[in-house]
Image (cartoon, rainbow, N blue to C red):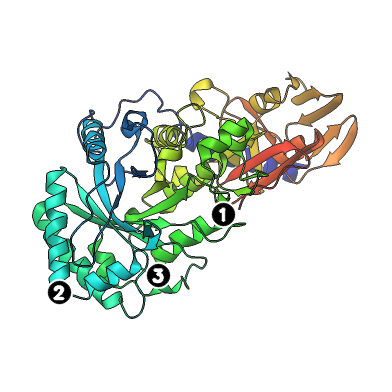
Amino acid sequence: MGMKFKKNMIYIITAILIASSFSSVFAAESAPAEESRGQYKQPDAFKVVGYYSGSLFDEPVSSLQTDKLTHVVYAFLIPKADGSLVPLEKPNQLRELTTQAHRDGAKVFIALGGWSYQGTPLVSVFETLAASETSRAELVKNICAFLQEYELDGLELDWEHPNQTSIGNYEKLVVELKEALNKEGKELTAALNGAWSTTAGPEVSKLMTDTCLNSFNFINVMAYDMNNGEHSPLWFANTSIDYWLNRGVPKEKIILGMPLYARPSWKQYRHLAAENPDYAYQDYAATTPLESYYNGLNTLREKTYIAMKKAGGVMLFDVNEDLTDERSVVSMIDDLITRTQNASLDEVKRHITVILNQRELVFNPVEGYGVPFIDANSRTMLPMRKPLESIGAEVTYNAATKTVTALNGGITVQATIGENSLLVDGQAIPMDTTAVIVDGRTYIPLRAVFTAFGYDIQWHSVSNTAYIGKAPLPAVSQ
C-alpha cells in the first residue's frame, strides 16, 4: 500500500510539472501582433507562403488573406529558350496583389516556370536556355528588370526538373541568379521535390547540389503529387522534411508544401467543401466521375504542427483554392501561430491536439479547463469536464470519494482518482494508468474513458494528435 501511494504521488507530481509547462502555450490569443501592418514580418518567423496562380483562377485579389501570409508567390512567369519572358496575362492583377500584400507586411515573389505552358512541359525550355551562357545572361537581366518593374521581393525558380545532364547548367543558372539578385536586394527560392525516404530521396532531389541549396533563401518542398491514392499523406510530409534536414538544409529554410486540391479528380478544397461541409474535415471523398484523395483541414493542421516542430514554415498550393469561412486553411494556420507565439519549441513539441467528431476541441488555459498531457505511463490525459460534456455526457464529481461519474447514452462510467480501473455500468475495467488531479483539475485517461462510451481512438504520434469518433472511426491519412 505504501509503494502504491508513492507511485501515485510520482504520477501526480510529474503530471503537475508537465501540465504547468503548457500554461503559456495557448494563452496568447489577445497578444499584440509582432509588428504593425505594412512592415515585413521578421525573417526568422514561421513562414506562411501562398502560391497564387493568377492565370488559372478568377478569384479577386481582395479575397486573399494577405494579412495572414508572410509570402505570396505569384505564378507563373514563363521563360523562353533565348532568355526572354512571355508577357504576363494579367499584369494589373500582379500589381494589385503586390500593393495589397506589401500593405499587409507580406513579401511577393514571382514563380519562374512551372510544370508546363499551354500544355507543353517547360523542362526542354529550361534545358536549352541554361545550356547557353548568353541566354542565361539574358534571362538574369530580364528577371532583374521584371522584379524592379513590379516592385517584387524575390524569385522562385520552378524548373521541373533538372536531370543528370542538365544539373550542371541548373547550378550555373542558380549561381548567376543569386549573384544578380543579391545586388538588387532580392531573394531567391526554389520549388524542390518531397521524398518518400529520409535519406534516399528521388533522383531529382539527390542531384541538387550543395551550391544550389546554399544559394536559396529557402526551399518550398513539394510534398504532394506522389500518386493518386497517396497524393499527400502525413508521413510523406514528415519524411520530406527529414530528407532535406539530412541533406544539411537548416530547418528555418525548409518550407513544407501542402496541397489544396484532390487527385485524381483535381477538385479544389473549397469546391469539395461546397459539395459537402464534412468534406472539409476528411481526406477522401467518393466524388464522381473520379474520386478525391486530398488533405482536409485536420490533416493540414497536423502538417502545420510538424512544420512548427522541425521546419521553417508551410506553403499552400494554391492558396486560391482556400475558403474564407471557419474552414479556411489560412485562418487555421494563423490561429495556430497566434496560440503558440509565446511558446518555446519544447512546449510546441509536447502540445497535444484533440479532434472530436472531426472538429478540433481547443483547450485554452484562459478558460480554466486545463490542457491535455502525456503521463508517466505514456498515456494521454484529458481534462475531465470539457471533452465529456462535448459528447453530451452528464458529469459529476464526488469530492469525498474523489470519483468522477459520467452518464451518456445509458452508459455510466466512473473513475476514481488514483485507482487503476474504471467502473463501466458497475463492472471493473482494468487501466494501465490512473485519473489524477492537477492544479485543482481532474484529468482522465483518454482511451479508457472514451472507449467505454463506444468511441474509437486514433493516435498520430508524429503530430501528437488524438482523433476521437464513434466506432468505427473513418481512416485518417497518415
The residue lying at 39 percent from left, 32 percent from top is 338
For label 1, the residue is: 233
**In the rendered view, would you say 120 is above or below 473?**
below
Q: Secondary structure at mark 1?
A: loop
As shown in the figure, which amino acid type bears the numbered disc 1? Answer: Pro
As shown in the figure, which amino acid type bears the numbered disc 2? Answer: Glu
The residue lying at 27 percent from left, 47 percent from top is 44
For label 2, the residue is: 133
Q: Could you tell whether 197 is left or right of 475 in the image?
A: left
2 or 1: mark nearer the eye:
2
The residue lying at 55 percent from left, 46 percent from top is 295
Q: Could you tell whether 295 is left or right of 406 in the image?
A: left
The residue lying at 45 percent from left, 39 percent from top is 321
For label 3, the residue is: 205
Sequence-wise, which precedes: disc 3 or disc 2? 2
As shown in the figure, which amino acid type bears the numbered disc 3? Answer: Ser
